[in-house]
Image (cartoon, grey):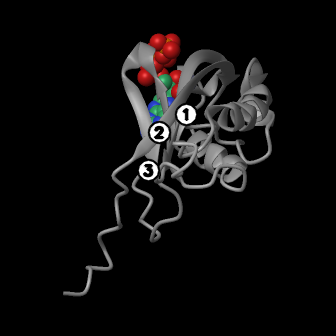
């Protein structure tokens, strides 16, 4: 039977690495006077997930040293910054940060499957799995 094109193949092996960054932002779409419209800071947690099969010889899907190097470059661009000043993050929501990280890492991380960005302090997060069919923007 032919596979259903709407259900993507899920690899049986996933590896991931988490990293933290602290950053300031404001949400330009917030109403004037709302706390979200003023500069404030968050502690963010991000997770980079890779799908793949372990190499027959090395046993590795992707070496964590190489993943760490890619992450460090992206983390350095975010940590202790005003996110709104970063190209592509003019509206720095969890959703936009997830997309930004995906775009930043996809050429350096083979098998990139998912980016998660969360704020543990308020139990909120975003999971992004890369380019997908365009969805309506509920908040616009
Ligand atoms: N869908 C989304 N909604 C909101 C986002 C977002 O990224 N995606 N972001 C915000 C603001 O960043 C807002 O500052 C979050 O505020 P809140 O949930 O009240 O959390 P705190 O400011 O209390 O966070 P602390 O880190 O605990 O100070 C709003 N909506
Ligand atoms: Zn905020």
| Residue 3 on image: x %, y % | 26, 80
- Return the mark for residue 15: 2
Q: Which residue is mark 1?
A: 31
The residue located at (51%, 42%) in the rendering is 59
60 relative to 21 in the view: left or right: left
Q: Residues within 10 Å of mark 1 (few under 14, many from 20)?
A: few
Q: Quadrant of residue 68?
A: top right
In the rendered view, would you say 84 is above or below 33? below
Q: Mark 3 or 2 closer to N-term?
A: 2
Q: Which residue is mark 3?
A: 139
Q: Mark 2 or 1 closer to N-term?
A: 2
Distance between the alpha carbons at the discs numbered 1 and 3: 13 Å
Contact? badges 3 and 2 (CB < 8 Å): no
In the rendered view, would you say 51 is above or below 134? above
10 relative to 77 in the view: left or right: left
Residue farthest bottom in this picture: 1
| Residue 47 on image: x %, y % | 51, 33
129 relative to 71 in the view: left or right: left
Depth check, mark 1 against mark 3: the one in front is: 3
């Amino acid at each position: 039977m032919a596979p259903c094109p709407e259900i993507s193949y899920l690899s049986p092996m996933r590896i991931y690495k988490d990293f933290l960054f602290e950053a300031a932002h404001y949400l330009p779409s917030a109403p004037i006077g709302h706390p979200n419209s003023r500069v404030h800071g968050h502690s963010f947690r991000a997770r980079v997930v890779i799908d793949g099969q372990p190499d027959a010889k090395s046993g590795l899907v992707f070496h964590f040293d190489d993943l760490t190097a890619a992450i460090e470059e992206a983390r350095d661009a975010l940590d202790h910054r005003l996110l709104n000043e970063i190209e592509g993050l003019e509206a720095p929501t969890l959703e936009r940060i997830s997309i930004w990280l995906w775009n930043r890492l996809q050429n350096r991380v083979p098998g990139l499957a998912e980016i998660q960005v969360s704020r543990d302090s308020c139990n909120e997060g975003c999971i992004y799995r890369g380019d997908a069919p365009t969805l309506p923007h509920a908040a616009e």
